[in-house]
Image (cartoon, rainbow, N blue to C red):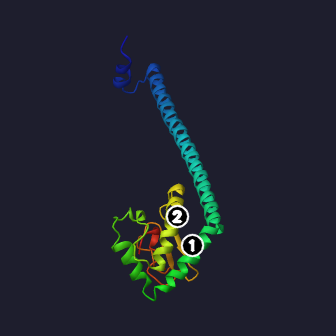
Amino acid sequence: PRPLLVLCGIGGRAVTVPCRIASLGGRVAAVIAATAYFDAENILTSEIDKKVANALETRRGQLEALVMETTDDLIGQAQNPTTLAAINGFSLAWRTLGGEQTEQLQTSYITNNTFPAGQRDNMDSIGDGSQYDLVHTKFHPYYRTVLQNGGYYDLFLVDADGNVIYSVFKEPAYATNLNHGPWRHPAPGGGRP
């Protein structure tokens, strides 16, 4: 008997039954392999989609919880008698500085701060005896603790006119006006102007 390959390759016009069976078997194998490949691809894609959807749902839940917790903290601080007293004290002290509050406060609490950026919150007082510094000395330790316990990046007190009258970390937004100053139009993506 001749090998099957010889019959299929040399047979010319005369195709034998084993050759037809081999050809049909090859086609069936190719269809089965292609079907298995696409089924496996669909199953893997489906599993990946499920895992991504579950991860997104978990993250969404975590983000919602964070927003609710932050909102509760914000409302609690807004109603806190200490915050009300601090806003009144800083607002009065702000007005005693005249028209150059931004320059005066940023020079005193940022430029001349003995601590570097990222640690400026460690300075409780500049020691100049001004009304603003007395109020700062009184409330700053409290708000530094609130910031640390809440895990916040910074904490601001803003008066009714949009003046950032207090900041724990004393970064560039400190002592500016949110309505008329450089922060009135934040950069896209929440970046600094």
Is 116 above or below relative to 106?
Answer: above
Q: Are marks 1 and 2 in contact (CB under 8 Å)?
A: yes
Name the residue that disc number 1 marks.
Answer: 86
Looking at the picture, tell me which residue is in the foreground, 116 or 68.
116
Looking at the image, the residue that sits furthest to the front is 129
Q: Residue at x 57, y 72 (%)?
A: 86
Name the residue that disc number 2 marks.
Answer: 143
Looking at the picture, tell me which residue is in the foreground, 139 or 41.
139
Residue 106, image x, y percentages: 39, 77
Residue 125, image x, y percentages: 42, 70
Quadrant assignment for the N terminus: top left
Quadrant assignment for the C terminus: bottom left
Q: Amino acid at mark 1?
A: Ala
Looking at the image, the residue that sits furthest to the top is 1
Q: Secondary structure at mark 1?
A: helix
Is 60 above or below relative to 110?
Answer: above
Q: Residue at x 36, y 77 (%)?
A: 107
Residue 83, image quadrant: bottom right
**Circle on res. 8:** none
Is 94 above or below relative to 44?
Answer: below
Q: Is residue 41 left or right of residue 11?
A: right
Q: Secondary structure at mark 2?
A: helix
Residue 159, image x, y percentages: 56, 79
Q: CA distance from mark 1 to mark 2?
A: 10 Å
Residue 176, image x, y percentages: 46, 79
Is 11 above or below relative to 141?
Answer: above
Q: Amino acid at mark 2?
A: Tyr
Question: Does residue 5 appear in this view?
Answer: yes
Looking at the image, the residue that sits furthest to the bottom is 99
Mark 2: give few (<14), some (14-19) or many (20+) Cα within 10 Å.
many
